[in-house]
Amino acid sequence: MGSSNSDGQFVQLHDIIMGSGNVADFLTELSSVAASAVSEDAGVFVECGVTLQRRKRSATIAGSSERAVVLDKLEQVLGEGPCIAALEAMKPVILSNVETDTRWPKYQKLLAENGCRSVLGVPLALDGHQSAALNFSLRNRTSLLTKSFAGLRGLLTSRAAH
């Protein structure tokens, strides 16, 4: 991510945080900004769903697109996948290839049927009783998504100090 572009993305993120009246609105806008930033950096279309977890119960509440919401809900219904694993570990979890990874076979089959090849779950700690995860989905290889995630993480951590 270039510095002038990163500055613009940070301003967008700041405006979302300051202008959101509730968590659902904030996460809906965050999913769009995150998907846009990662898509731009990777040079491919990336979608982002958001799962909110409160008191160990999770649900899909937002997404950058209807498809992103559907893909995230599939994971919630099955109770398995990188987003749920990211929430449990509070660390990013990558499903790099739905055809070769063996961790979540039912979920991966549904992803493949929906044209998704890789997913990245990124947890967000919100407060003591709730957390969220961004669930990035990509139709191509994960190496592009991993590179973009590194840039997004850099944007968020470098700006958190300001």
Image (cartoon, helix red, strand yellow):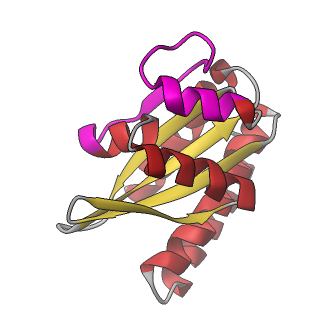
Picture coordinates of residue 121 (x, y %)? Answer: 47, 40
Residue 116, picture quadrant: top right
Q: Is residue 97 left or right of residue 102?
A: right
> Which residue, as the protein is rendered here, is positioned at the far left?
128
Picture coordinates of residue 90 (x, y %)? Answer: 28, 42
Question: Can residue 136 be seen here?
Answer: yes
Q: Above or below — where is 92 with respect to 158?
A: above
Picture coordinates of residue 95 (x, y %)? Answer: 52, 25
Q: Above or below — where is 94 with respect to 54?
A: above
- Magenta residues, start to end: 88-112
User: Which residue is rendered at x = 70% and y = 48% of the image?
Assistant: 47
Residue situated in front as seen by the camera: 22 or 62: 62
Q: How many marks?
A: 0
Q: Above or below — where is 128 with respect to 145?
A: below
Q: Above or below — where is 5 with respect to 59?
A: above
Which quarter of the rendering shows the N terminus?
Answer: top right
Q: Is residue 144 left or right of residue 54?
A: right
Residue 136, picture quadrant: top right
